[in-house]
Image (cartoon, rainbow, N blue to C red):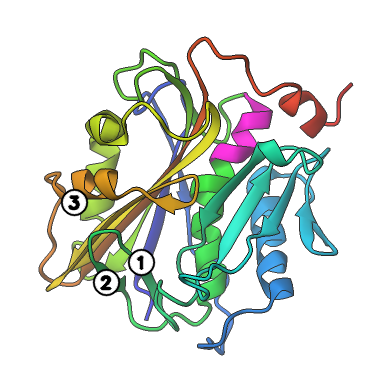
Amino acid sequence: MWANLHNVTVCAMAWGSWWRGRSGTGPGAPGGSAERPSAQAVLGAVADELSALHGEQWRVEGEEVRGPGALAVRLGEPREDDPDRLELVFLADRDRPETAVPDQLAGADGGFGVGGFGVGGGTGGGGAGGGDQDPLRRGVEVWASTAGAALIELVAHNGRFAGHLDPTDPDGLPGWHAIHGGVVGWGTGKRFHDVQDWLVRNPVLPALAPALGGDLGRDQLVGVQVCFGGGAGRRTAEVRVHGEVHAAASAALAALDWPRVTEGDAYARTFVLLVRRAGARPPAEVGLRAAGRK
């Protein structure tokens, strides 16, 4: 069963300058299922969570969720190597595929713990909790609080949804303008928050920078998902770059001194959008069109 879920959102121009706490409880509908959720169920949950987070209307239209202006979210195509995983693709401009940022959906099914909230790991595997009543809603809520918040901030650009890191910020990734989404923690037992608390105090981008290296495949709009934690006999540490597991960065994350909880479980997840390299031109007109301005 779900025990605890808590979210902290970075809301300043640098990590840790100030924080806005946001409860992450989500609706609890009965009847969790081991079957893959339907596309409409996933999109409906995405529309609900983004509307609540953004304060603007997001609605399902056909095979995508549309927000203000040209913002959209689509389901990613099933992967041959892992067909049960669910992927969400955020588009800052639905007519420009180069603005797409994919991210794995945690807490739904297949690889993330069917019927409960778990995580898939680049260096191991484990689950937190033991049977949520509505794992899909929980997973979408975690995605919205981390990746969704950073991606909305890309077009809002006002510090309300996520924090900004410049290329020289000691808490960022050297050479990159970045937007840091929320830090979500979950687990069971008295120490369920330990890993999240550690992540809040210890920004991981600088520690992962050597492993990430200089070539991330593109020079703008690169999503970096970080998810790690565990319990007795279980550990996971995974870094995904633009939707793909980054083995070297995952190993570097596993080697950091985050708390190893032995009673209960403790996990944390965050998401950083690398907007562009220093000196590169910003993604053209993304913010203006997405906000519905000429």
Q: Which secondary structure lies at badge 1?
A: strand
Residue visible at 47% across and 54% down in the picture: 23
Above or below for 198 versus 174: below
**Label 2: how many residues lie within 10 Å, few (<14), some (14-19) or many (20+)?**
many
Q: Report which residue position mark 1 lands on.
A: 119
Q: Report which residue position mark 3 lands on.
A: 254
Name the side, left or right, on which 94 lies relative to 23.
right
Looking at the rendered structure, the kind of residue marked 1 is Val
Is residue 203 at least partly visible in the picture? no
**Label 3: how many residues lie within 10 Å, few (<14), some (14-19) or many (20+)?**
many
Q: Please tell me whether the stretch drawn in magenta is mainly helix, strand or loop.
A: helix
Identify the magenta region: 150-157
Identify the residue at the far top of this view. 279
Q: Are marks 2 and 1 in contact (CB under 8 Å)?
A: yes
Residue visible at 48% across and 77% down in the picture: 109
CA separation, marks 3 and 2? 13 Å
Residue visible at 66% across and 60% down in the picture: 46
Looking at the rendered structure, the kind of residue marked 3 is Ala
Residue 96 horizontal/vertical position (percent)? 76, 38
Residue visible at 34% across and 72% down in the picture: 3
Q: Report which residue position mark 2 lands on.
A: 126
Closest to the observer, 80 or 224 = 80
Residue 216 horizontal/vertical position (percent)? 43, 34
Q: Earlier in the sequence, mark 3 or mark 2?
A: 2
CA separation, marks 1 and 3? 14 Å
Looking at the rendered structure, the kind of residue marked 2 is Gly
Residue 182 horizontal/vertical position (percent)? 45, 43
Closest to the observer, 175 or 57 = 175
Q: Which secondary structure lies at badge 2?
A: strand
Q: Earlier in the sequence, mark 1 or mark 3?
A: 1
Above or below for 175 versus 254: above
